[in-house]
Image: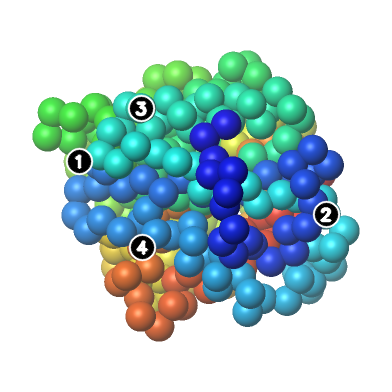
Amino acid sequence: MYFDEAYSGKVFIGSTSTYEESKAVLYGMPMDWTVSFRPGSRFGPGRIRESSLVLEEYSPYIDKHLEDLRYHDAGDLLLPFGNPQKSIDRIEETVEKFLHDGKFPLGMGGEHLVSWPIIRAMHRKYYDLAVIHIDAHTDLRTDYEGEQLSHSTPIRKVCELIGPENVYSFGVRSGERAEFEYARTSGMSFHPFHVAVPLKQKLPALAERPVYVTIDIDVLDPAHAPGTGTAEAGGITSKELLEAITAVSKSKINVVGADLVEVAPVYDPSEQTQIVAAKFIREMLLGWVK
């Protein structure tokens, strides 16, 4: 796999298992080659790990402790700078290896394009895969200024791969008119502006299905997460996103993998974005890895 074997950096709090004995693998995808506004999300995974050290290992939301979970922080993937195609190929190959080895992959971005190769690998294993997409942006463009590999295109690619009727989008509040029209007419389960309430309403329909969850940190209002490349006013609170993550944890859906993307620490000297992202990662590990 494309990890630095000599990696000796910080790991996410509670990571003590080796890869072989782990149930879940946490990994970083430090890529921001196609962003349309502000770069810097390639530094997100490392700063999320550092910020995790302020957390408790116990979750009072679901009464679980990281010491009860065998998971391994593999570090960051070595991705060729400025080469999106080769980068996503490496991500896809890595996730295929995780799945072959029976691991639960939990990725940290990086820009949102990194979700596309993950979901492509997931779909090869789970033919009836559904995707929950939590984001400020539609990400439904076919291209951005002529470039099909863009952080504004992954969910359109996913719809074309697994069928729009298997994609559930929440919290969206920004995109082109044509993207909103596609979301409303294609068969997607599309729920703009809000997350927790509509998500809870949809979870029973996804019971027992394999589900991949992708979360863009910019679904939060910039007041809660200013450290992102394309901040969008009018978002949800960190409390609402925690409520949504907890609802998934307590549901009967079969989460088979997840990611959290677009944390760009340089735009948040207060570090609140990476701190809240670390808490989300903790809750996803404890609640979604069965």
**Total numbered labels:** 4
Q: CA distance from mark 4 to mark 2?
A: 28 Å
Q: Nearer the viewer, mark 1 or mark 4?
A: 4
Label 3, label 2: how far apart the Cα atoms are: 33 Å
Between circles 3 and 2, the one closer to the viewer is: 3
Q: Quadrant of the N terminus?
A: top right
Q: Quadrant of the C terminus?
A: top right
Q: Earlier in the sequence, mark 4 or mark 2?
A: 2
Kindly identify the residue that appears in the image at 45 percent across and 41 percent down: 78
- Tag 1: Cα neighbours inside 10 Å, few (<14), some, or many (≥20)? few
Could you tell me the amino acid type at mark 3?
Lys
Residue at the spot of label 4: 264
Instruction: Confirm whether residue 153 shows in the render.
Output: no
Q: Which residue is mark 1?
A: 177
Q: Earlier along the polypeptide chain: callout 3 or callout 2?
A: 2
Q: Within 10 Å of the Cα at label 4, are there few (<14), some (14-19), or many (20+) other Cα atoms? A: many
